[in-house]
Amino acid sequence: MIKYQRKKMTHVVCNCCGKEILVEKEIIKEGIFYGRICWGYFSKRDGLEDSFELCEECYDNIVATFKIPIDRKVSLELL
Ligand SMILES: [Zn+2]
């Protein structure tokens, strides 16, 4: 969950465990997973938009439960 005050990002909290993510001058200083979806016509949630944020630990714990491992690529050039 990302909180804003006067259009400035002030707090980021992991939706899974509640951990407060370090934010300095609107820059997120930790790894974070952003989940966003606008549900489509053939879903049971047509017209709804969901979003959440996860800290790295919760991300690791959740993907570790997948039956099929995630795809992971290594980026050689970081911007
Ligand atoms: Zn977490």
Image (cartoon, rainbow, N blue to C red):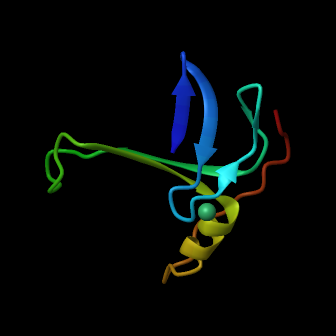
Of 51 and 68, nearer the camera is 51
Residue beneath the point at 59% across and 79% down? 64
Quarter of the rendering containing residue 23: top right
Q: Residue furthest top?
A: 6
Residue 47, given in percent of the width and then of the height, sits at: 18, 39
Q: Nearer the viewer, residue 38 or 6?
A: 6
At 85% from the left and 40% from the top, the residue drawn is: 77
Quarter of the image with the C terminus is: top right
Vertical position of residue 75 compared to residue 2: above or below: below
Residue that appears at 47% across and 49% down: 52
Q: Position of residue 66 (x, y in %)?
A: 50, 79
Residue 30 versus residue 71: which sits nearer the camera? 30
Vertical position of residue 6 compared to residue 72: above or below: above
Residue 44 horizontal side relative to residue 16, left or right: left
Ligand 1, what quadrant?
bottom right
Quick check: 8 above or below 17? above
The tally of labels here is: 0
Image vertical order of residue 75 relative to residue 65, above or below: above
Percent coordinates x, y for residue 55 in the rendering:
65, 58
Q: Whole-percent x and y of residue 32?
A: 66, 50
